[in-house]
């Protein structure tokens, strides 16, 4: 009788656990950075395996660091590659942001970034106007098309496609899809500082809260200047504020960014851009774009593109003068300070 009672208690506890979502935390390394996934689940599923499968699929499709990936083969001139749906989605979103920013966001700019020594590739020893003009001929997302068969068509085989400025955000979105396919309704995904939130933190019965990094904090002791709430939104940031240079004449702090339209490495007065959007991929791409656009042009884009909100840190002519700009709707995400 005692044994039967014990079994009954165990069964009841198992049923009770099934009706009460439990917090699960998964953390580790992916895409060369750290990640943490928090979610509430009623039932167990192989989340670690499914997470790894999602990341592996993204890498196989669009990692320029993987020599046998689809994008690496395309960049190497392989015209037989048939891209998957993920590649098509990222290309389509890249084109949307490319058009919205009038070409300032451009996944084909990598050939110029490498030439200046700002990217992973080796810089060119000589970079004059003649060389720049020759490289610019290979820049422009309008130089890439996709056939009905799913093959990438390039105007010139030297056109180099690089989704690194959007792929991490897209990977986070795909992890969110994976969780939802397994019945998860409340989660927070963080990968390399980029985030996607769905539902709420059930333990606190409040929306998920995340922070915007304080640019004056040292790398070894990072803290946050603002806290924001995310409900069914993605958030991503871009910034070179720890790699800024100082103009010896004006004292102004600036970071270098490559203008895809001119091919020139220009001063950017935007030190960091934090973007909230409906997807993390959108937030990722627009955050990158605002760094290239600069303060005034970024404001114009924000005024004309729906569903994108931003928190920009930018400089003025005075030395060490860092200002904050928030788009009209960004205030609604801020957590009031006590």
Image (cartoon, grey):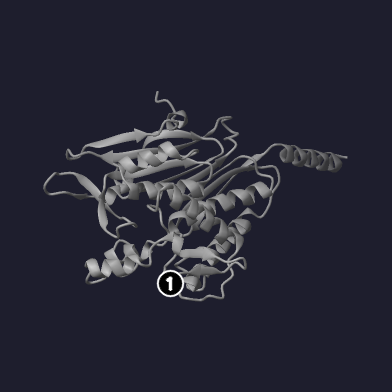
Image spot of residue 17 (x, y percent): 72, 39
**Extreme residue toward the left, this view:** 249
Quadrant placement of the C terminus: top left
Vertical placement of 12 versus 286: above or below? above
Q: Residue at x 42, y 30 (%)?
A: 328
Residue marked by disc 1: 156
Tell me where residue 224 sits by quadrant: top left
Image spot of residue 285 (x, y percent): 44, 50
Vertical placement of 156 versus 279: above or below? below
**Extreme residue toward the right, this view:** 1
Q: Residue at x 49, y 58 (%)?
A: 30
Q: Nearer the viewer, residue 287 or 80?
A: 80
Any part of residue 273 in sight: yes
Q: Nearer the viewer, residue 219 or 106?
A: 106
Any part of residue 213 in sight: no
Image spot of residue 129 (x, y percent): 23, 66
Q: Is residue 83 left or right of residue 195?
A: right
Q: Is residue 197 left or right of residue 19?
A: left
Image spot of residue 53 (x, y percent): 60, 61
């Amino acid at each position: 009788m005692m044994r039967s009672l014990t079994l009954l208690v165990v069964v009841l506890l198992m049923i009770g656990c099934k009706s009460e979502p439990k917090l699960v935390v998964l953390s580790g390394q992916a895409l060369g950075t750290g990640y943490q996934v928090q979610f509430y689940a009623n039932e167990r599923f192989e989340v670690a395996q499914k997470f790894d499968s999602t990341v592996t699929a993204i890498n196989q499709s669009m990692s320029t660091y993987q020599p046998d990936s689809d994008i690496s083969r395309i960049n190497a001139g392989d015209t037989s590659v048939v891209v998957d749906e993920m590649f098509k989605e990222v290309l389509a979103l890249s084109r949307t942001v490319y058009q919205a920013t009038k070409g300032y966001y451009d996944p084909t700019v990598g050939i110029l970034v490498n030439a200046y020594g700002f990217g992973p590739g080796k810089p060119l020893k000589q970079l004059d106007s003649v060389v720049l003009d020759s490289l610019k001929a290979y820049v422009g997302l309008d130089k890439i098309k996709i056939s009905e068969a799913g093959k990438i068509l390039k105007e010139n085989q030297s056109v180099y496609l690089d989704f690194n400025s959007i792929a991490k955000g897209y990977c986070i979105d795909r992890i969110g899809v994976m969780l939802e396919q397994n019945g998860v309704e409340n989660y927070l995904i963080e990968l390399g500082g980029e985030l996607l939130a769905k539902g709420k933190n059930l333990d606190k019965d409040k929306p998920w809260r995340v922070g915007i990094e304080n640019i004056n904090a040292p790398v070894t002791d990072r803290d946050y200047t603002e806290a924001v709430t995310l409900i069914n939104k993605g958030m991503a940031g871009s910034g070179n504020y720890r790699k800024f240079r100082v103009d010896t004449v004006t004292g102004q702090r600036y970071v270098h960014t490559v203008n895809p339209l001119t091919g020139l490495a220009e001063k950017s007065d935007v030190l960091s851009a934090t973007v909230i959007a409906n997807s993390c991929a959108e937030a990722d791409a627009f955050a990158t774009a605002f760094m290239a656009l600069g303060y005034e042009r970024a404001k114009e884009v924000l005024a004309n593109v729906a569903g994108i909100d931003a928190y920009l840190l930018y400089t003025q002519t005075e030395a060490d003068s860092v200002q904050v700009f928030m788009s009209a709707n960004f205030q609604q995400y801020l957590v009031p300070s006590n």
